[in-house]
Amino acid sequence: MLEKLQMYFAYDFVKFALIVGVLVALCAALLGVTLVLKRYSMIGDGLSHMAFGAMTVAMLFSIAPIYLTLPVTILSAVLLLRGGGKLKGDAAVAMLSVSSLAMGYLLLNIFKSGSANLSGDVCSILFGSTSILTLKKSDVVLCAVLAAIVIFVFVFFYNKIFAVTFDESFARATGTQSSLYNLLLAVITAVVIVLSMNLVGALLISALIVFPALCAMRLFKSFRGVIISAAVISVCCALAGILISILYGTPVGSTIVAADLAVFLVCVIIDLCKGGRKA
């Protein structure tokens, strides 16, 4: 197995996949803790389905997907996380999720009805595919730049994000512009969603965001401890998933999620053995 891995590491596509996988997993874990604590765990589903709709339009008009998907997802995140209008919370997420998914699939069927690879296109977007193993150097650079921005924003505004996460009313009373930081969270959430689509697909993004946070919360109580452990767990699961996928030919996204699920079950057992809360 080690010899096989050494052989694969000689190829650039494997190195690119590992770099992107680590960066995306790290960003998703950092953001996931905040989203889970703010009870926005399902925001990933709504935004990823919106990104699916935007990506299908980009495919139909032969536009580079990120140029349409990123702004559309950012706009959707702002509308959802800021709670504008009368439709809020779970209702807004559900409506956005279902309608975007349905419209995206409908458009693909109407305008690509003669394509023999229609089902392949849909499965690739929804569940991820080997696209993570066919990344170009420009894709890796773009991912690295966006990931660096997300990490910088999270680290630089750590105290403000902490305050807004746990007590938004108190943060507002102490002079913190909570609406501004919610907007910032919305933007970086959208960026992470778009980055994650190549790795795990539109339907599995929530797992990448939620599982590491839930695992870390079983092991640690402090916000900093949860953040650090979630990042470590997410990166390790992403690396394990990608390497297993390369070695055994399994779907990348599903393998990463399976690794996250396995670690979560271990964390639940550890928590129960310590006399922690029930699963």
Image: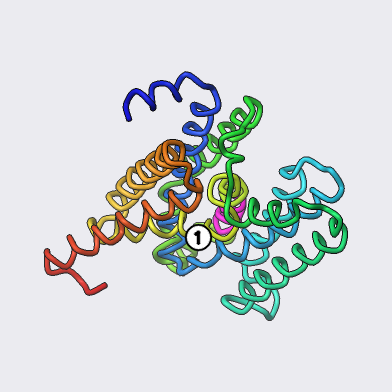
Residue, x 62% and y 25% (percent of image)? 137
Image: 96 above or below 27 = below
Point out residue 170 in the picture as x, y percentages from the top left corner: 42, 67
Q: Quadrant of residue 269?
A: bottom left
Tally of numbered tags = 1
Q: Is residue 6 above or below residue 260?
A: above
Report the residue at 53% width, 56% height from top.
205
**Residue 58: x and y, percent?**
80, 49
User: The residue tagged with tag 1: helix, strand or loop?
Assistant: helix
Q: Quadrant of the N terminus?
A: top left
In the drawing, does residue 276 fall left or right of residue 191?
left
The residue positioned 79% from the left and 67% from the top of the image is 106
What residue would you read off at disc 1? Answer: 206
- Closest to the observer: 38 or 48? 48
Residue 101's image quarter?
bottom right
- The quarter of the picture where the C terminus appears is bottom left
**Residue 143 image point, x, y percent:** 59, 35
* Label 1 crowd (10 A; few <14 / some 14-19 / many >=20): many
Q: Nearer the viewer, residue 8 or 172?
A: 8
Instruction: Please identify the residue farthest to the front as the structure is shown.
Output: 116
Left/right placement of residue 52 relative to residue 271 reads: right
Q: Is residue 167 above or below residue 66?
A: below
**Helix, strand or loop for the magenta stretch, by majority:** helix
Q: Quadrant of residue 85?
A: bottom right
| Residue 82 among magenta residues | no
**Residues rendered magenta in the picture:** 181-190
Q: For the point 58% across and 41% down, which residue is it?
A: 130
Residue 227 screen position, x and y as percent? 35, 49
The residue at the far left in this view is 274
Q: Amino acid at mark 1?
A: Ser
